[in-house]
Amino acid sequence: MVLLIPVRRQLLRGFTLVELLVTIAIIGVLVGLLLPAVQAARESSRRTQCQNHLKQLALGLASYESSHEVFPAGCLGCRKIDGQPNGKQMNSWSAQLLGQLEQVALADAYEHAVPSYRSPNRELGATLLPMFLCPSTTSDVLHNPNGLWRGQAFTDYGGIYGVEGPGRDADFGHLQTLADPYLGVLLFEVPVSAVEITDGLSQTVVLAERSKRRVTSAEWTNGRNLFAHEGSTPINMESGLGHDIGSPHPGGALVAFCDGHVEFLANSTEQNALNSLLTKAGGELP
């Protein structure tokens, strides 16, 4: 006699439509919660890289000063000297710094007596140098597409010329455009020595992130790659007078000091304190 033993069958059950929609909604919420954290982590990494680039440039400037006993002139061939044209070479502080940035081949080939927009400097200036670029910059344009500096590579950092705005202009005939108390370290034609920075090397900004990027005057060969920040304008605000300090990093911008250190200055930095950091001999108290 054969006994038949009943076999229980386990029914396989799939997701109902409601359960599927709930699962998708939960995943969407989790992604929404995680994405800002991932983006913040990426931006933190980019800001660190940007800080390292500015640090490299600041140390290059400090090394230049140690070797030459002066910082490089902000622009060679940008202004008239004794009322006479100087050739308009418009060669930048950054081009003068190539040797200190381990760009020996570029430094040897660069001709400072030739305008920065003419051969061989035009071709040399097409070289992309990572230490001149901020990885958080949204534009993917790396070379100027038009004008005198067409084809030359951009930089996202500018030399600090000083603090501009009402009441700060120099008298007519002055070599610089700003009166002496409002001048920074990287000037037209004139190299500045450490002794002249009476506000202190650790209290004086020499380089900063530019608010306007990938535009003419932002090429690393261009001697106009320096700017004065408008004295009533906070960081990351536009004054309308030209370039100011600003960055794509949330909350502020990175600046480099004459002694080689780099700081992140918040948008909320008190205006007088900011202005005092941008001049070399303003006589402000630290």
Image (cartoon, rainbow, N blue to C red):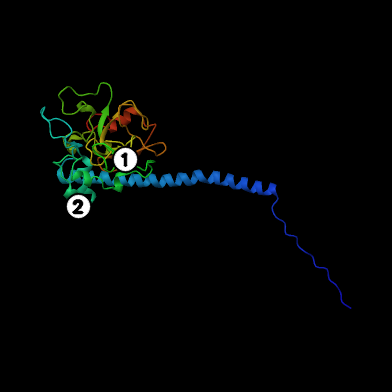
- Secondary element type, mark 2: helix
- Secondary element type, mark 1: loop
Instruction: Give the image location of residue 77, x and y in percent.
Output: 16, 35
Residue that label 2 marks: 105
Which residue, as the protein is rendered here, is positioned at the far front? 146
Give amino acid for label 1. Answer: Asp
Give amino acid for label 2. Answer: Ala
Instruction: Judge by depth and name the residue closer to the eye, 150 or 261.
Output: 150
Q: Quadrant of residue 138?
A: top left
Residue 156: which numbered mark, if any?
1
Would you say residue 286 is visible in this rendering?
Answer: no
Q: Quadrant of residue 190?
A: top left
Q: Residue at x 80, y 68 (%)?
A: 7
Number of numbered tags placed on the structure image: 2
280 up-or-down from 168: above or below: below
Q: Tell me the quarter of the image containing the N terminus.
A: bottom right
Q: Quadrant of residue 264?
A: top left
Instruction: Give the image location of residue 249, x and y in percent.
Output: 40, 39
Q: Residue at x 16, y 28 (%)?
A: 175
Instruction: Give the image location of residue 247, x and y in percent.
Output: 36, 37
Q: Residue at x 51, y 45 (%)?
A: 35
Q: Tell me the quarter of the image containing the C terminus.
A: top left
Would you say residue 33 is visible in this rendering?
Answer: yes
In the picture, measured across the screen, residue 217 lies left or right of residue 2, that is: left
Residue 13: which numbered mark, if any?
none
Which residue, as the protein is rendered here, is positioned at the far right? 1
Instruction: Give the image location of residue 226, x and y in percent.
Output: 25, 35
Bin the neighbour count of mark 2 within 10 Å (Cα to Cα): few under 14, some 14-19, many 20 and up: few
In the picture, measured across the screen, residue 17 lies left or right of residue 109, that is: right
122 up-or-down from 178: above or below: below
Q: Residue at x 34, y 42 (%)?
A: 141
